[in-house]
Image (spheres, rainbow, N blue to C red):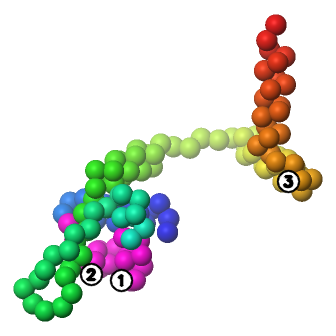
Amino acid sequence: MSVEVEAQLLSAVKERSLGVTELSRAMRRRTQVVVSLIKRMEAGGLVDVTLERGAGRGRPARIVSASILGEGYLEAFHRLRRMPLRSSRNDLLRARADAEYVNRLIARGRDPYRAFLELNGIVGDRRDP
């Protein structure tokens, strides 16, 4: 799932705790998708899940609420969302050239990270008197 879907779930449960069915309606997603997303986010510590016994029969409802870490995640998501990305054509061309260079290194059996460290070491040695 994407970061946007996780933020959508956190936004829905930030105001008040919701059950899985209510959450799937609010997000307009299938229940299976919401359940798998909840499991993944619970493992990451972004949401807290509690079981609530209803008055009727059946399995207890799973109530989802945002954890403190989840609220921080949502705030960071909104802060980054408001930040405009600025790049020129030259920036994009340079990024493309860098990606092609990395692909050539990989094709030749070289680790791009090690090559970067070697280059960094050479540049660092030249700067030191």
Which of label 3 and label 2 is nearer to you? 3
Which of label 1 and label 3 is nearer to you? 3
Q: Which residues are magenta?
A: 17-38
Marks 2 and 1: CB-CB under 8 Å? yes
Outermost residue on the top side: it is 129
In the rendering, which numbered label is found on residue 80?
A: none
Q: Secondary structure at mark 3?
A: helix
Tell me which secondary structure the magenta stretch mostly adopts.
helix
Amino acid at dot 2: Thr
Q: Say few, some or many: other residues with alpha carbon within 10 Å of mark 3 (under 14 / 14 to 19 / 20 or more).
A: few
Q: Say left or right for 105 vs 16.
A: right
Amino acid at dot 3: Ile
Q: Which residue is mark 3?
A: 106
Marks 1 and 3: CB-CB under 8 Å? no
Q: Pick whichever of labels 1 and 3 is earlier in the sequence.
A: 1
Q: Which residue is mark 1?
A: 31
In the rendering, which numbered label is found on residue 21?
A: 2
For the residues marked 3 and 2, what is the alpha-carbon distance in whole angstroms?
A: 47 Å
Amino acid at dot 1: Thr
The vertical placement of 121 against 29, above or below, is above
Image location of residue 99, percent across then percent down = 79, 50
